[in-house]
Amino acid sequence: MDQIIVGMADCRIAEGAGQVLATFALGSCIGLAIYDPQTKVGGLLHYMLPDSTIDPARGKANPYMFADTGIPLLLEQVFGRGAVKRRLVVRAAGGAQMMDRQNVFEIGKRNYLALRKILWKSGILLHAEAVGGVRSRTVRLDTATGKMWLLEGGEQRELVAGASRPGGN
C-alpha cells in the first residue's frame, strides 16, 4: 500500500486501490477528506488558518495554508479527476484548542467555522467530523475503500459518515 503524506499547508489527490492519503498532528489545523466512491478519487487537505486576507501574499504563495483558498482548490482538483459533487463523502478532523488555553485566538474554532461556511456555500454536506477538544489527531483516507481512519489519544477508529464528535474528547 502506497502512503501519500500530506504535510501541513498541503493537499494531495489519489485514485483507486493501493493508495492511502495521510496527514499527521492536526491540532488547530483541519484535515478535510473528500472522496467519490464511484470514481474512487480522494483528496486530503491540511490547512492551518481560516482566512487568507490576513496575508494575501502568503495565501497566493501557498493557498493550501488557508481554508478560503485551499478548500476550493481541493474541490477543483477532485472534480478535475472525475469526482461528482452529489456523490462526495466529506469528513473533517482537527480544529482543537491546542496552545491557546485562554481562547484568545480560537484558531481551531475559526478553522472549523470557515470550513462549514465554505462547504455550505458550495452546496456540499459534511458527513462526519472529529473536531474541537484539546487532542491532536492523525487521519488516513484509503482511496480503494473510502474509509477514513482517525488516530486520537492513542485510539484508532474509523470516522464513519454520519458520525459526529464535536468537542472530540
Image (cartoon, helix red, strand yellow):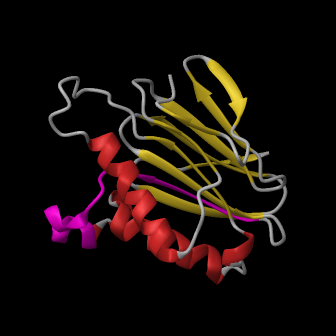
Tell me if I can see residue 34 in this picture. Answer: yes
Asked if residue 48 lies in the magenta stretch, the reply is yes
Viewer-proximal residue, 46 or 162? 162
Q: Is residue 9 left or right of residue 61?
A: right
| Residue 99 image point, x, y percent | 25, 26
- The image shows residue 55 at horizontal and vertical percentages of 15, 64
Looking at the picture, how far across and down is residue 12, in whole percent?
56, 61
> Which residue is the extreme one toward the top?
154
- In the image, 128 versus 46, the foreground residue is 128
Look at the image and tell me in which quarter the N terminus lies. Answer: top right
Q: Residue at x 69, y 48 (%)?
A: 141
- Give x and y (percent) for residue 97: 32, 30
Q: Quadrant of residue 107?
A: top left
Q: Does the magenta stretch include residue 66?
A: no
Q: Residue at x 63, y 73 (%)?
A: 78
Q: Going 26% across and 73% down the picture, which residue do you hit?
A: 60
Task: Please indicate, yes or no, whether residue 48 appears anywhere in the rendered image.
Answer: no
Q: Which of 142 and 37 is in front in this view?
A: 37
> Quadrant location of residue 121?
bottom left
Q: Name the residue rendered at 52%, 69% in the picture.
A: 74
Q: What stretch is highlighted in magenta?
A: 41-60
* In-image side of 24 versus 1 (left or right): left
Q: How many marks?
A: 0
Q: Is residue 69 above or below residue 32?
A: below
Q: Quadrant of residue 14?
A: bottom right
